[in-house]
């Protein structure tokens, strides 16, 4: 069936040690959980190796107790805090934790990386299944502020032509929004209209990475990754990146996506760094966004004697067309010049493999924690048809997927799977392809390099100031650096826990002196900025919607 499976067991056959899955990787999560246990959960090595009960072996009861989650009670859901499915169920049943926020508070699940509590994580799945067994209503809404799922809200915002979170809340929601709905609405607005994410208050509803147009690192500094479309980069661009990295003391690395990354930039230096990159002819690579990241390519027919088509040029064409297109999750593409697959196109959300007649198009593959092999959508199609099908596929995914859902699990949940997707994208069975193509054309037409606009706009540059009340800067992170492999690296160490009572209390506030925190007009609505007071950093938040006047301005020390 085109798949390969190899599993390694202990000498006595009682424990699963590890394994390799190629092609069909749907059992990866189950096998991963099983490898963490002391036995095989009633299975035999033969049944696990062949993916079906061994001769004479019964299939047995479902490990999930029949709730449809595919998870046993002892399976770890939150690996950051070691929280199991049983812990989640216990909190729901015994502590009446009926929302994601309540489950997080009771179990600490999702307070690490947060991945298990996303709309496609295991915590919402277990919560819905457990509430159903208790006979309680299961809300399909994003959160308390919107009674709609992402797909429904996407259609509403599109039809009503809503352009902001405030308009969405007034029109079809309630309240001021929260950490769940704000990034979802931000993603929908960007996927529909592709307007600059830092303008008109949209910066306050972005995730941290999008808020600063860069990926935050464990040191509190940020990465700077320009676009290298298709991995194609000129000597002058290489020299510019090297010179800028040396000037600002940044660590450099060739990334896994055929790009050059620079690491260790403080937020307030980002505009200066990017101004030099922009003036050297480079633009943002969107490494920080839920958007197209890169289109990986091999050298293709231009250089390789096996190449069937010019894969680099095709990769550059794809990347130039879809750069900046926001989606429910990141999108990766690849173009291989022949069936040898050097660009690993069948491990991407959208991949092309060159043939003598054109390209074979594969969709809905990914690597990561849950790898999935891409599936064939169309064969031997020309470049124009590739772009047409890609437009339709991407906008159909953007319109219908859950928030933070990659294309592979999206396809698994799609009724009819790949055959249905072929009918929609290739045969236009729903009659929506013209609309999907028009939506993509609008996205492409509205593209602007986000960093180019920032470095030439003083108001946007203010959003990257370290402090609201002064132009002074200071080393907030206090990172110790060491020399390693001819470059500067952070000296990683375990930070001490901060314990004990607070040094100051609200009771002492009457004796304090007022300090200038900045101009009120500079503080964003329902957001905050940092101010400098001596050597201390204070985070100041402006919340004008609160009924209590004393609660409309809040401050706390940055630690």
Image (cartoon, helix red, strand yellow):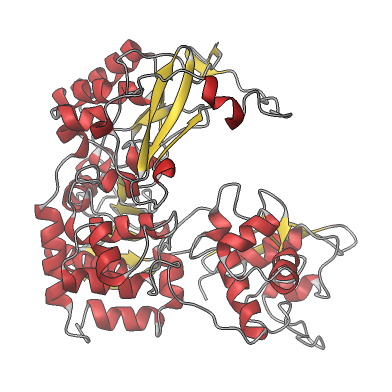
Whether residue 287 is visible to the viewer of this picture, yes or no, is no
Whether residue 105 is visible to the viewer of this picture, yes or no, is yes
Residue 166, position in %: x, y? 26, 58
Residue 132: name its quadrant: bottom right
Residue 254, position in %: x, y? 39, 30
Q: Considering depth in this image, is 149 or 285 the residue closer to the camera?
A: 149
373 sits left or right of 86 in the view: left
102 sits left or right of 178 in the view: right
The residue sitting at the right extreme is 12
Q: Which quarter of the image is occupied by the C terminus?
A: top right
7 sits left or right of 454 in the view: right
Question: In the picture shown, does residue 66 fall above or below 35?
Answer: below
Q: Considering depth in this image, is 106 or 522 the residue closer to the camera?
A: 522
Identified at 16% across, 67% down, the residue is: 161
Residue 510, position in %: x, y? 53, 25
277 sits left or right of 505 in the view: left
Residue 69: name its quadrant: bottom right
Question: In the picture shown, does residue 294 fall above or below 126?
Answer: above
Question: In the picture shown, does residue 134 fall above or below 46?
Answer: below
Q: Considering depth in this image, is 418 or 115 the residue closer to the camera?
A: 115
Identified at 77% across, 82% down, the residue is: 54
Identified at 57% across, 60% down, the residue is: 101
Identified at 20% across, 33% down, the residue is: 460
Q: Considering depth in this image, is 86 or 310 the residue closer to the camera?
A: 86
Residue 74: name its quadrant: bottom right
Residue 457, position in %: x, y? 14, 30
Question: In the picture shown, does residue 506 fall above or below 246?
Answer: below
């Amino acid at each position: 069936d085109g798949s390969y499976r190899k599993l390694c067991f202990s000498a006595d056959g009682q424990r699963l040690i590890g394994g390799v899955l190629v092609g069909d990787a749907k059992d990866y999560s189950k096998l991963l959980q099983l490898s963490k246990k002391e036995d095989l959960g009633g299975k035999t090595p033969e049944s696990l190796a062949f993916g079906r009960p061994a001769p004479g072996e019964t299939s047995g009861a479902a490990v999930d107790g029949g709730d449809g989650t595919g998870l046993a009670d002892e399976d770890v859901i939150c690996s950051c805090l070691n929280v199991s499915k049983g812990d989640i169920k216990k909190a729901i049943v015994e502590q009446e934790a009926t929302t994601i926020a309540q489950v997080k508070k009771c179990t600490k699940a999702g307070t690490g990386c947060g991945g298990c509590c996303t709309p496609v994580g295991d915590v919402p799945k277990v919560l819905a299944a457990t509430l159903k067994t208790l006979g309680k209503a299961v809300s399909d809404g994003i959160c308390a502020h919107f009674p709609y799922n992402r797909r429904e809200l996407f259609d509403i915002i599109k039809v009503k032509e809503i352009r902001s979170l405030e308009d969405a809340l007034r029109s079809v929601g309630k309240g001021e929004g929260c950490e769940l709905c704000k990034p979802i609405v931000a993603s929908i607005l960007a996927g529909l209209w592709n307007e600059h994410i830092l303008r008109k208050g949209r910066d306050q509803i972005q995730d941290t990475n999008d808020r600063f147009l860069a990926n935050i690192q464990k040191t509190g500094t940020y990465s700077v990754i320009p676009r290298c479309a298709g991995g194609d980069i000129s000597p002058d661009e290489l020299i510019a990146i090297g010179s800028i990295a040396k000037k600002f003391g940044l660590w450099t690395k060739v990334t896994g996506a055929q790009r050059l990354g620079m690491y260790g930039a403080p937020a307030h230096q980002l505009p200066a760094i990017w101004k030099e990159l922009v003036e050297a002819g480079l633009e943002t690579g969107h490494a920080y966004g839920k958007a197209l990241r890169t289109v990986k390519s091999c050298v293709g027919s231009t250089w390789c004697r096996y190449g069937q088509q010019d894969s680099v040029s095709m990769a550059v064409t794809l990347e130039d067309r879809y750069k900046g297109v926001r989606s429910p999750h990141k999108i990766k593409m690849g173009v291989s010049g022949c069936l040898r697959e050097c660009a690993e196109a069948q491990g991407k959300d959208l991949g092309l493999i060159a043939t003598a007649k054109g390209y074979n198009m594969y969709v809905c593959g990914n690597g990561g924690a849950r790898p999935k092999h891409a599936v064939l959508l169309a064969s031997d199609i020309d470049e124009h048809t590739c772009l047409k099908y890609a437009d339709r596929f991407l906008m159909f995914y953007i319109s219908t997927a859950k928030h933070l859902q990659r294309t592979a699990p999206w396809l698994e949940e799609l009724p009819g799977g790949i055959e249905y997707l072929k009918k929609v994208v290739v045969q236009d069975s729903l009659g929506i392809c013209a609309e999907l193509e028009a939506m993509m054309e609008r996205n492409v037409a509205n593209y602007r390099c986000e960093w180019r606009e920032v470095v030439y706009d003083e108001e946007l540059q203010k959003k990257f100031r370290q402090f609201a009340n002064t132009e002074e800067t200071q080393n907030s992170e206090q990172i110790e650096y060491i020399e390693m492999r001819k470059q500067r690296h952070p000296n990683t160490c375990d930070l001490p826990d901060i314990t004990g009572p607070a040094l100051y209390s609200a009771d002492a506030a009457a004796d304090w002196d007022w300090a200038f925190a900045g101009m009120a007009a500079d503080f964003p609505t329902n957001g905050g900025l940092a101010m400098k007071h001596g050597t201390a950093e204070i985070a100041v938040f402006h919340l004008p919607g609160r009924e209590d006047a004393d609660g409309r301005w809040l401050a706390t020390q940055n630690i």
